[in-house]
Amino acid sequence: MANRNPICDGIFTAQGVVCASGEETRALGRALAEAIATDATLSLEGPLGAGKTCFVQGLAEGLGLDPAMVSSPTFTLVHEYPGGRLPLIHFDLYRLNSEEELAGLGYEDYFQSPGIRAIEWGDKFPAALPAAAWQIRLSIEGETRRVRGTR
Ligand SMILES: Nc1ncnc2c1ncn2[C@@H]1O[C@H](COP(=O)(O)OP(=O)(O)OP(=O)(O)O)[C@@H](O)[C@H]1O
Ligand SMILES: [Mg+2]
């Protein structure tokens, strides 16, 4: 995985990256998307309003997609955005009740071809995450957000 961008490399350090605004969180997502060569699954974790959707808007932008298309897929659970450098698949598991429901979405099928899969609340069903998924944790620190990841 080509990943030479110092901004997004900071995500994977012990202290992570502090974002002072939604725009900074988006910029971080954009930098990460630009550094992903062909394929990644990102489990986006953190409390309500932490900036997970904001980060996914940045991923979209980094793939050359219009970030305004990305909203919370709360009621549909999954949105697919083709047309960028790589396909972007955006899940939100917040309202999902069981792993069986996930299977009903054809969840596994989304892991068969290259693309970026961003899974909000990916820690809700850890057994359903592919082993290679990266964890991206957003925590709220006053008016700012800290973004930390493991890969
Ligand atoms: N540093 C920051 N990073 C991200 N968002 C911020 C920041 N500061 C303020 N915000 C605001 O916090 C909100 C984050 O909302 P967002 O929908 O991205 O969160 P979320 O984690 O997806 O929430 P949910 O769990 O409800 O899906 C936005 O309104 C954004 O403008
Ligand atoms: Mg969200």
Image (cartoon, grey):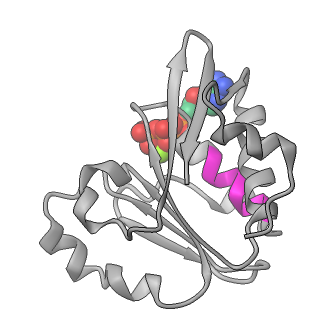
Residue at 74% of width from left, 83% of height from top?
Answer: 83
Q: In front: 86, or 76?
A: 86
Residue at 73% of width from left, 20% of height from top?
Answer: 20
Residue 67: quarter of image: bottom right
Residue at 55% of width from left, 90% of height from top?
Answer: 113
Q: In front: 21, or 115?
A: 115
- Counting from the top left corner in percent of width and height, residue 10 is at 74, 37
Is 101 drawn above or below residue 71 in the view shown? below
Residue 100 is one of the magenta-drawn residues: no
Query: Would you say the magenta stretch is mainly helix, strand or loop?
Result: helix
- Counting from the top left corner in percent of width and height, residue 8 is at 76, 45
Q: Write down the region rendered in magenta.
A: 55-62
Q: Looking at the image, which residue sits at the far top?
A: 142
Q: In the figure, is residue 52 to the left or right of 3?
A: left
Report the label total: 0
Residue 15: quarter of image: top right
